Amino acid sequence: MQFWIIQSLNGVAYGMLLFLLSAGLSLILGMMKIANLAHGAFYLLASYIGYSVVRTTGNFPLALVAGTLTGLGIGFVTERMFMRRLLGRTHLQVLVSIGIALIIADVSLVLWHGDPVTIRPPALLARSVDLWIMRFPAYRLFIITSGLLIAVVLNIILGRTRWGAIIRAAVDNQEMARAMGINIEKVFMLTFGFGSLLAGFAGVMGAPFLSVYPGLDWELLPLTLVVVIVGGIGSINGALVGSLILGLLDNYGRALFPDLSYFTLFVPMIIILAVRPSGLIPRS
Amino acid sequence: MKPRHALFTFLVVVLVAGPSLMAAPPQVAAAAGTPTPAASLPPLKLGFYGALTGNFASSGKDTLSGLTLFLKGINYTAGGRKITVIVEDTSGDPNTALAKARKLVEQDKADLLVGPTLANEGYAVRDYIDRAKAPCLFPVVSGDDITQRKRTPWIIRTGWTSSQPAHALGKWAYDQGKRRVAIIAYDYAFGWENVGGFQRAFEDAGGKVVQKIWTPQTTSDFAPYFPQIKKDVDAVVVAQSGGNAVRFLQQWDEFGLKDKYPLYGLAAVTDEAVLKSMGDEAVGLFTVLHWSAVLQTPEAQAFVKKFKEEYKDAPGYRAEAGYVTGQVIARALENTGGKPGGGKELVDAIRAVKISDAPRGPISFDPYGGVVENEYIRRVDRVKGELQNTVIATLPNVSQFWTYDPSVFLNKPVYSRDYPPCTNCQ
Amino acid sequence: MAWRRAQVLTVIVSILALGVLPIFLPSYPVFVLTSVLIFAIFAMSLDVLIGYLGYTSFGHAAFFGVGAYAAVISALRLGQSFWGSGLLALAVVLLVAMIFGAIALRTSGLPFIMISLALGQALWGLAYRWSTVTGGDNGLSIPMRPELPLIGRLESSLAYYYFVFVVFAIAVAALSLLVRSPFGLSWRGIREREIRMQVLGYHTWLHKYLAYLTSAFFGGLAGILNANLTGFVSPEALAISNSATAILMVILGGPGTLIGPCLGAAVIVVMRQIMSSVTQRWMMVLGVVYIATVMFLPGGLMGMMSRLMVRINSGAPQRSDRSQGKNVERTPATHIQSGGKS
């Protein structure tokens, strides 16, 4: 019994980490329909920068800020220089974002040599909590709470604020929004920036969990893409549900069917997508 | 010229010039420092190919660093013969490794190949090397069968086989009083071979492996596996490397398991390349490998000092392997007066090399292309604020077959997931 | 008309060059050219989906990989010859495509991209984990070459090159005929407006399904040829990077032209080989090339060339060409909006 409780808790922790990663992509891909395949690379870059900040200053909150700003910065540049000219042309978005991802990955290789590195959680969170048969790291509980917090914040912003309404209007119907005087370009730029900011934030939050190494960007990207799609394009809560399902599936898959672990992850996704192509919680 | 025209022209030039460029004389990427008037013999062309970009770049780069360090030290000359090096990048992809090996052999006419970096690259090029009769030294690739059941006279290792150190640890763990162990390892050939070697030696001595947990190659989270570990084992043996090793140890500690089980490490889990990213969670871990950066011999320390001066970090086993490869080549040339141009003569000369002053200690080659070397049992200690692999025991002259008769060994199947079978697993 | 003539001329010249040039080249460039032709087939097969049907697949490597694995496994474990293993592999590819197509074509647009990604990843994971069958990470090796009556085994690089060249020429011919056939035109109709096609009485699902199968068939063919070239297969053949490379080749070359993706394949394969020998930062260079292509050549290479032809035939190009019923300004790729269907 305790075994299952611990596995479930861990699945939720991993799912919450995925949510942190996918929330940004859910905004960009889900709401704005921009195929930014460099999202994983944004995460990677922010992770590495966070690592360097922690290494030199030992200050985790500072690293979080640095990573978040990295995400914002690179997202801003990407949107400004490339994405805004490619709205509606998915192929070209794919090509450009892969190009950007390649460049970011190679720059990271040059700057950080390619060795796997990790960030130690701040002392406050570095302890473990006793849970029956084993101890559970406090940092993972921190990730769970952070994920929930972000979900709540995003829901409030998008659902309750004027700004959220503007974003939703711009995404739902560009023409109408323009007619109502909304500056579409500005909305897209800010939303893209915000989504990338979340990727940067997730990069530093996730580093003590997943560590940082070349190839992480391409490992995470398929997972986040599937979460966004399965959860329902354009739905933050859908991404939350999708992440939790994915996290639990992954955890149980590894615990119960270690031989098929990667397979068990994608097959349910395929089934869900085939049965409900619009995702679990689509925007109505 | 408009940008699009410029791009078009560039592309046309690339397309047309492409094949022609490839037919052109090779680009020599690294050459001698001070030009020494060469003997009447042409330079020995060395073709290095490894993962210099991509996910495994740090491994390939380390090997190249070690090799370059040595060659620079002898001024790219040995036995009166100049050595030139052509460097190619495989990005850790087997298809690319094969293409690059072909390029080095067919286009650049390399006399000797050094590489690749990964086991799957090694298996991919093996058939080609055998067909092309291209001498190739494998500094790092440890797939057992390459010098066992799939051996070819053209491949000689200057590194290790996965099970080579593992046998040693199996015996040593038994000598330390361990009788029942659980193993948690990578679920692919590298992990299987490590585990197989450990299990064979451990059980032959009288121990029992009671659990084997296999983890996928890309495991970011080991937590699902921890609750499964049996309670009544004397020790846990882990076979993970690279980023997985960093995460494993961190999570092992986070989940409170460091205090519960003694931990032994295979698969170069605390190699210097990753040790620097680890913290206190690694202290006290026993591991086995044919190298340690704090091996207290004059040759080892001289190498470490030189390497640190040039590259700042302590050399891990891949860097040392590159260095030793250079040593072997140089010694082969010296022993034969610089004569062998390539082919069988070169291979024979290399096979006959015995070095007593390699950084890792004495090495020689067995008739199967494997290397015979010392294995060191190491323990991770924190000394002067830094982590290091302190050598606490030395097992000399360990071959890829451990203490077993090679023909008996080779008649059995290669170590795999199911071999040796886990007869004691409940 | 001039554009059309230029296209045909280019094709003829290229085929002649590809047929004659290799005799004078050393073995390594011949090897690279063989690789180029194989990836050209791969890219063309994906163009059927992206350029003609309008469906972007992010898991096309699945068919390449299945073809390669099936060929190697049947040669290794079932003792099949080149032809036997090839035919068996093609059958397996079609079987997989029939299953995947039935699942994936329930969606379109962005969900289709994702489901094709998921299908590709599932197979990749399978190749990694089912090591008893696939050899796992280390892959499987077996030297394979076709045997022809009278000529014998095509062992040398040049002999195999010509074999691949013949297959490539057949593939080009077959696909060209197919996309110009009423069948192929229906694909373009579906790409433009599926509803309209349905209203006109077409069984669009069947047409899409057959397009998918065609695409998979040629993709698998490329995989089989590659396995024979290298004598080796490993999970990289199914990896997402291989799918991404295929998409890049199509977009770089110009979707919807067949020849464009061939050019794209040539550029990417050759550039990779050359660049990686010249600089270690070649991945960065590649990234810059992709970005530059998007910013300066949105229609890919073919799009640029068609604009160049317009410029060469200058003098009110739009009017004269439009009067001939050709809308030259619409370069092959720009009308592919994609992502719009959901």
Image (cartoon, helix red, strand yellow):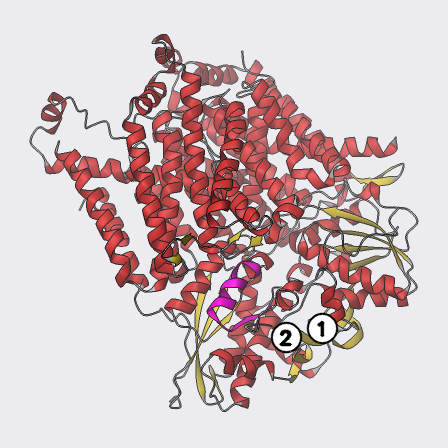
Q: Is any atom of residue A73 visible in this view?
A: no
Residue A112, percent from left and from top: 55, 55
Closer-to-camera residue (B155/C241): B155
Residue C286, percent from left and from top: 39, 49
Identify the residue under disc 2. Answer: B304
Query: In this rendering, would B179 be left or right of C297?
Result: right
Query: In this rendering, would A220 be left or right of B421?
Result: left
- Mark closer to the chain start, 2 or 1: 1
Q: Residue at x 60, y 54 (%)?
A: C138
Q: Residues within 10 Å of mark 1 (few under 14, many from 20)?
A: some
Q: Residue at x 79, y 75 (%)?
A: B395
Labels 2 and 1 touching (C-beta < 8 A): yes
Query: In this rendering, would B122 be left or right of B406?
Result: left
| Residue span colored magenta | B123-139
Closer-to-camera residue (B107/C174): C174
Does B178 lie within the magenta span?
no
Chain bearing tag 2 is B
Report which quarter residue A64 is drawn in. Answer: top right
Chain bearing tag 1 is B
* Amino acid type, mark 1: Val
Q: Are marks 2 and 1 on the same chain?
A: yes
Residue A263, percent from left and from top: 64, 36
Q: Residue at x 75, y 33 (%)?
A: A252
* Amino acid type, mark 2: Val
Closer-to-camera residue (C171/B339): C171
Q: Residue at x 35, y 23 (%)?
A: C187
Q: Secondary structure at mark 1?
A: loop
Identify the residue under disc 1. Answer: B294
Residue A179's place in the image compared with B156, above or below, is above
